[in-house]
Image (tube, grey):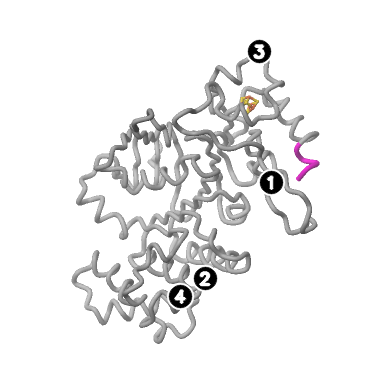
Amino acid sequence: MSERPFLDVRDLKVHFRTDDGLVKAVDGLTFRLERGQTIGIVGESGSGKSVTSQGILGLHRHTRAEASGEIWLDGEDLMTVSDERLRQLRGNKIAMIFQDPLSALHPYYTIGSQIVEAIRVHHRDTSKSAAKARAVDLLGHVGIPHPARRVDQYPHEFSGGMRQRAMIAMALANDPSLLIADEPTTALDVTVQAQILDLMRKLQEEFGSAIIMITHDLGVVAEMANEILVMYAGKAVEHGPVHDVFYEPEHPYTWGLLTSMPRLDRARLARLNPVPGNPPSLINVPPGCAFHPRCGYTGEVEGARCRSVVPDLAPAGPEHLARCHIDDARRAQLYATDVKPRL
Ligand code: SF4
């Protein structure tokens, strides 16, 4: 029997009962991740990508959410561990980096005291001075100049990029083996974004953490991730190694995401091709393939199957999966003739 991977998420479902109906925010997600590897979970807002990370952190507990499936982390099923154990794991073995550091950093406390607190919550026997020395060390590590001085400053005294670095330092305080980064660079300008991604890559090499990178921007995961999982309306629609998803994408939604990506080599004012239409409401997910109201290829499928039958997430290559009724050969042809010329 093969050994379990470091993180093994199986058939994860997170549903919410609301007055208007059942919201299937995550509807049967399966993926695995090894230490030192990064998976990019990509989708528009409302695709279920952030609820997936909240599910892994157990944030649905004691809410109206109904969650099922298995989340094995280093041999423990996070779905069944006690609240106490989950609290120990959060911030210790699992850490989170958010989009907006200001919402994660408290404005009334210095950056240093917040890192010290993050350390001492999990290691009560660490003295304040030892924790502070570690905070200075961590700030230096994430590229904050004069860390011994800046450790005593408040979040508003840091620039946006520096705050994001400080939050990464805080996330790393307890050497987490799983780092969940939810849109970590969205609020930053392109240059700072590149610096932060570069920093995360270096830290991953050094610390060997597994990273789940959640983003709406395929470009962010292009160089960082080993594999990509594209989500639409709570389900995976494409999943595979980064190279396959970028160079041999199999799903019309991924084609839309790729053609709408801004590219440096394209004229600045060149028109982008955004995916037409809006993501569906999760209360009213379209029947059949949830993407069908926005898909330009339904004519390729016989009858009304796109509108009535949910496609399976089926093999499209050795490690590549896609959820579309069009057969593989025709999809390859469509990609080559219709999509690739627009990239
Ligand atoms: Fe488009 Fe139909 Fe494929 Fe869905 S199953 S992506 S609607 S062609």
The residue pinned by badge 4 equals: 141
Magenta-drawn stretch contains 79: no
Q: Quadrant of the N terminus?
A: top left
Q: Which residues are magenta?
A: 339-343
Q: Which mark is nearer the camera, 4 or 1?
A: 1
| Distance Cα–Cα, label 3 vs label 4 | 58 Å
Cβ of mark 2 under 8 Å from ligand 1: the answer is no
User: Which one is in front, 318 or 295?
Assistant: 295
Which residue is the site of mark 1?
Answer: 260
Residue type indicated by callout 3 = Gly
Circles 3 and 1 in contact, beta carbons < 8 Å: no
Disc 4 + disc 1, Cβ < 8 Å: no
At 54% from the left edge and 58% from the top edge, which residue is drawn? 186
Q: Which of the two discs, 3 and 4, labels the residue nearer the N terminus?
A: 4
> Disc 2 designates what residue?
161
Residue placed at 67% from the left, 19% from the top? 301
